[in-house]
Image (cartoon, coloured by chain):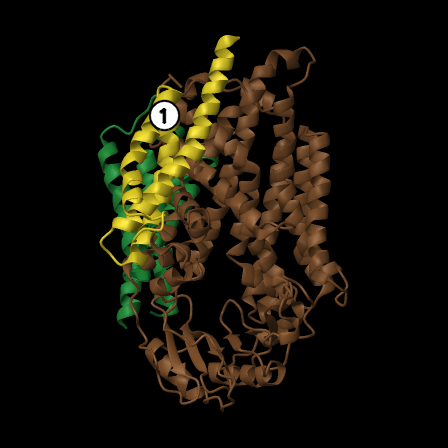
Chain colours: A yellow, B brown, C green
């Protein structure tokens, strides 16, 4: 009985990680690319957005391929560090200089 | 999840496929139909068929359109003229509503009421008022991403989420398919679950590039809705600037000058564009601030010369006729990429042969979703084999899936066919006619769905598939009885769009009837006779009987 | 490009894909068995079937590129491949005996159509 609950909790955890966490990661990558690519800003925003939709399904698949739900969350967080830092540094959403 | 990559991807594939499957089936069916949406609209407007047989020069058609617009919408700030093409031989006009009355400033204008539109006979410039009111193929096309009876934002999110599920399902399906090359040509009918799996594999793998393309590009068409963060990061609140910068649009003065001036004759402008783009190269004309001092005339190239959905434009001063923009502006790579992706999705660039191939691939997509849904139910049924043998019942989940599967797979074709039937049967003068046609679509679907939910038995599959088959196959006959544009007429007068519609629905109808017949055959006997040694893969228990 | 050249190239692309996939399918034991009985195998013919099969697919590609150009040509080719593969699968399943005559006819007519298209285009 306990193992079924554990199993279901794991599935739920991964589902949240995949859908919400995956979206968050993709959004950060879209923003980070938009802010840093060396092309015109319109081009960069476009490329970033196109890339996000390649990242998202791969992230979802990776979450479910992981050995445990915990590893999935940790992996997502680690992957988000770099793009997250870029977005914070370039002040995208805090009104700083773009 | 500890089982390994293939198994975890199999799990992911089954669940993403199932949960999004029913909506995806609708999206695939309406999307596949949309390849021929203009032809469908034509079929649904028999009154327009007469005008189709005449060829009208673009210059004459344009002159007729301008004359009509001068009369109908003289105060409008924007006229849009879509010239006749092979797919759509009528002349279409749209115009922005006249500037708001200052006294009514605060009023919210309903979205639909914003632009006026009229379809004209290109030879005479007269409104095809006699053509029955119908949304034609546009109804199916819009349903493909806007669904119906709900705010479009909701439906676009729902469809978008299903599309993401689909993308994950395809990719996980590829990872989990062990023998993708060995099984490439394999199809073993009449073996229950094995056959459904083979059919699912075949319809998925044989058109795999298409399925990947159509899903990803579908998401791309609305990607700024789903993922605005790239644009937001760089443009913050000035989103509109992104779109103008991307397309490198020639800036057209947004404000009307309100000072009257004569509109420059359009013939020389058309001639210049034709010189640059070839005979019949102009697809659309947009006139901003017509008959005012800052008028601008933009000529857009016709679809079909290139894959990208963004057509180059030549912009002229609307009073002097001077060229304001150069004809070929190469878009930057990423903008081009998006244009090409949307172009691939809509396939408006495609010739007749290529479009037919896209249509076939789309049908394979419908088959892939349908066989996948059925496979899920067949597999799940195995859990209940013992209980069923003792006269018991399946669990609630499977019961629900059975009902939804039947309601979707047999219901959607019934709905589409009913929509076409309604077009011929509803009185031409009926008020709110398009809404009534839509009501027939949903009424028929609702009826089928209720029956499906109530009793998703093999017999019900037979009945509903047969109903769909009869409705589809009966359309050419209905056409014969209710209009003059029946198959004999359309073939002899070269109205290939109309004839094509009749023939394709006939084939679809026969296909559905064949499927219904197959449902009637007992699978159990055939399975027991199978020579197990012939089947290299382990024979799985037949779960086909329902 | 005239309608005739167009039609010939479309035909060539489709027929070559059909012929190509026929060859590739027969190079596999399980489909060879469908024609020649259990336990049989193409043996030394395998390489030859694979080569011919690939050649067919490449001819289909060439016809598609000639017909539609460098970008759209690839799209056309993938479509022709799908259509060809579907026909081969259905034939193998329901009329296996007919596959070889069908493949031969498709191969010969594809080559003829390609040559005819060249000629029609040159004239």
| Image coordinates for residue B302, horizontal then vertical, percent | 42, 70
The answer to which of B331 and B352 lies nearer the viewer is B331
Residue under label 1: A72
The answer to which of B416 and C2 lies nearer the viewer is B416
Please, is residue B104 above or below residue B367 in the view? below
Please, is residue B249 above or below residue B73 in the view? above
How many other residues sit within 10 Å of disc 1, few (<14), some (14-19) or many (≥20)? many
Q: Is residue B262 left or right of residue B41?
A: left
The answer to which of B372 and A94 lies nearer the viewer is A94
Q: How many marks?
A: 1
Is residue C61 visible in the rendered image? The answer is yes
Q: In this view, does B94 lie to the left or right of A70?
A: right
| Image coordinates for residue A55, horizontal then vertical, percent | 34, 39
| Image coordinates for residue A21, horizontal then vertical, percent | 40, 33
Question: Which image quadrant: the N terminus of chain B?
Answer: top left
| Image coordinates for residue B161, horizontal then vertical, percent | 49, 41
Picture quadrant of residue B466: top right
């Amino acid at each position: 009985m306990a193992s079924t609950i554990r199993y279901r909790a794991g599935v739920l955890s991964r589902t949240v990680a995949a859908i919400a966490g995956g979206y968050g990661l993709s959004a950060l990558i879209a923003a980070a690319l938009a802010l840093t690519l060396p092309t015109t800003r319109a081009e960069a925003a476009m490329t970033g957005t196109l890339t996000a939709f390649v990242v998202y399904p791969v992230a979802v698949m990776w979450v479910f391929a992981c050995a445990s739900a915990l590893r999935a969350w940790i992996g997502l967080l680690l992957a988000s560090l770099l793009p997250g830092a870029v977005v914070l540094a370039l002040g995208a959403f805090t009104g700083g200089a773009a | 999840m500890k089982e390994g990559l293939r198994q975890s991807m199999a799990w992911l594939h089954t669940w993403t496929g199932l949960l999004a499957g029913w909506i995806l089936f609708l999206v695939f069916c309406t999307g596949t139909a949309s390849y021929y949406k203009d032809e469908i609209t034509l079929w649904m407007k028999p009154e327009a068929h007469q005008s189709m047989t005449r060829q009208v020069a673009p210059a004459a058609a344009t002159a007729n359109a301008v004359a009509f617009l001068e009369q109908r919408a003289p105060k409008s700030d924007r006229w849009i003229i879509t010239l006749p093409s092979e797919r759509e031989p009528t002349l279409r006009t749209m115009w922005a509503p006249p500037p708001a009355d200052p006294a009514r400033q605060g009023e919210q204008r309903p979205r639909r009421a914003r632009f006026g539109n009229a379809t004209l006979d290109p030879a005479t410039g007269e409104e095809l008022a006699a053509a029955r009111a119908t949304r034609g193929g546009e109804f199916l096309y819009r349903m493909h991403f806007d669904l119906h009876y709900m705010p479009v934002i909701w439906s676009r999110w729902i469809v978008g989420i299903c599309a993401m599920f689909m993308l994950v399902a395809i990719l996980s399906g590829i990872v989990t398919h062990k023998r993708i090359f060995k099984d490439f040509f394999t199809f073993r009918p009449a073996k229950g679950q094995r056959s459904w799996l083979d059919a699912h594999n075949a319809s998925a793998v044989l058109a795999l590039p298409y399925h990947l393309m159509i899903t990803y590009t579908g998401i791309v068409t609305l990607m700024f809705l789903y993922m605005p963060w790239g644009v937001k990061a760089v443009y913050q609140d000035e989103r509109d600037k992104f779109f103008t910068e991307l397309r490198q649009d020639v800036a057209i003065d947004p404000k009307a000058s309100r000072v009257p001036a004569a509109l420059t004759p359009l013939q020389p402008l058309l001639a210049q564009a034709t010189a640059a783009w070839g005979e019949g190269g102009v697809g659309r004309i947009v006139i901003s601030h017509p008959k005012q001092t800052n008028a601008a005339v933009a000529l857009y190239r016709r679809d079909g010369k290139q894959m990208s959905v963004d057509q180059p434009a030549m912009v002229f001063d609307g009073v002097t006729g001077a060229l304001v923009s150069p004809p070929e502006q190469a878009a930057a790579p990423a903008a081009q990429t998006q244009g090409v992706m949307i172009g691939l999705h809509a396939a408006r660039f495609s010739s007749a042969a290529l479009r037919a191939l896209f249509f076939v691939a789309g049908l394979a997509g419908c088959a892939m979703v349908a066989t996948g849904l059925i496979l899920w139910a067949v597999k799940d049924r195995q859990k209940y084999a013992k209980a069923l043998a003792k006269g018991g019942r399946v669990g609630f989940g499977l019961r629900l899936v059975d009902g939804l599967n039947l309601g979707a797979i047999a219901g959607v074709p019934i709905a589409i066919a009913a929509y076409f039937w309604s077009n011929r049967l509803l009185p031409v003068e009926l008020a709110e006619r398009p809404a009534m046609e839509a009501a027939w679509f949903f009424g028929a679907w609702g009826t089928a769905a209720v029956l499906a939910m109530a009793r998703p038995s093999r017999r019900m599959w037979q009945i509903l598939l047969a109903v769909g088959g009869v409705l589809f196959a009966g359309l050419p006959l209905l056409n014969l009885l209710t209009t003059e544009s029946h198959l004999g007429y359309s073939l002899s007068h070269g109205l290939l769009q109309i004839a094509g519609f009749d023939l394709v629905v006939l084939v679809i109808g026969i296909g559905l009837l064949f499927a219904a017949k197959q449902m009637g055959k007992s699978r159990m006997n055939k399975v027991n006779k199978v020579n197990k040694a012939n089947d290299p893969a382990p024979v799985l228990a037949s779960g086909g009987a329902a | 490009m005239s309608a005739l050249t167009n039609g010939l190239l479309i035909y060539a692309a489709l027929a070559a894909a059909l012929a190509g996939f026929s060859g590739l399918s027969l190079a596999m034991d399980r489909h060879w068995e469908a024609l020649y009985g259990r336990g049989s195998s193409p043996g030394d013919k395998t390489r030859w079937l694979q080569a011919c099969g690939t050649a067919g697919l490449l001819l289909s590609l060439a016809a598609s590129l000639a017909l539609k150009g460098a970008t759209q040509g690839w799209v056309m080719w993938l479509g022709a491949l799908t259509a060809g593969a579907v026909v081969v699968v259905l034939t193998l399943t329901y009329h296996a005996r007919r596959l070889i005559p069908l493949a031969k006819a498709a191969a010969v007519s594809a080559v003829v159509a390609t040559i005819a298209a060249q000629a029609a285009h040159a004239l």
